[in-house]
Image (spheres, rainbow, N blue to C red):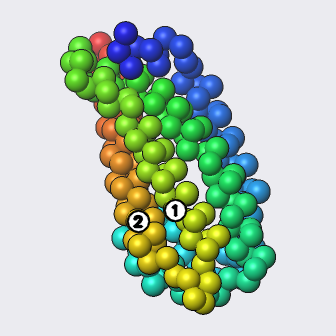
Amino acid sequence: MSPDQFLVRYSSPLLALVILVGASLLLDRFNPKNDIIERLGKGYFSTDQTPFYRPQQLFDMLDRYSEEDRRAHVRFIYLDLIYPLIYSVTAAILLAYLLPVLVPPLPARFTYLSLLPFAVAVFDYLENLSLLYILQRYGANNRPFGMACFSSVMTTSKLFLMYATAALFLIGLVTLVVKGLRAARR
């Protein structure tokens, strides 16, 4: 059984979408970094949403962190360890439903595209763990430059794969709508 067949057979796209939206709203609402974002204003940047950030950008932001800010960021990372699992499973389910719409019949090599969200999650976990390492060791005399570079590469890789996944979604949805409109005309 191919990955897309497994996901389609044992899942529901509507339930997956509801879980993803619910988890996203909860994470946003109870984000321990909300106070940091408000306090630092323009001095804050989202390390998990900024591709190609330089280690110095991260260090400049961390220099403005209070001890409570650092603890809040660590709490966020612990919460964020759950989210990649939720979004990767959800996105894989949705892709498994959309990919056959794009290329019917779906050649076997394309079925693995439904696993793309799991690659996003791997880079997200590596990014989170590297930031956790930095936050736990960061100080005036300890600026883990190599780990900051690694974290930036993981973020950039995650975002690149996330954009590719989003492009597949959009193309799949547009194709589905176009096919639906053509079928309705007949």
* Image position of 75 (left or right of 89): right
Q: Amino acid at mark 2?
A: Phe
Q: Which residue is mark 1?
A: 130
Which x, y percent locates residue 86?
59, 37
Please tell me in which quadrant of the rendered image residue 54 appears: bottom left
Query: Which of disc 2 and disc 1 is earlier in sequence?
Result: 1
Q: Residue at horizontal 60%, vertical 78%?
A: 138
* Image position of 186 (left or right of 44): left
Closest to the observer, 78 or 15: 78
Closest to the observer, 10 or 66: 66
In the rendered image, the vertical position of residue 129 relative to residue 169, given as above or below: below
Please tell me in which quadrant of the rendered image residue 4 appears: top left
Q: Quadrant of the N terminus?
A: top left
In the rendered image, the vertical position of residue 177 relative to residue 148, given as above or below: above
Q: Which residue is mark 2?
A: 150
Which x, y percent locates residue 135?
62, 71
Residue 149 shows in the view: yes
Which x, y percent locates residue 60?
54, 87
Q: Residue at horizontal 73%, vertical 60%?
A: 75
Q: CA distance from mark 1 to mark 2?
A: 7 Å
Q: Quadrant of the C terminus?
A: top left
Which x, y percent locates residue 18?
64, 33
Closest to the observer, 138 or 13: 138
Marks counted in the figure total 2
Closest to the observer, 52 or 25: 52
> Given contact means CB atoms under 8 Å apart, are the residues at marks 1 and 2 in contact?
yes
Q: Amino acid at mark 1?
A: Ser
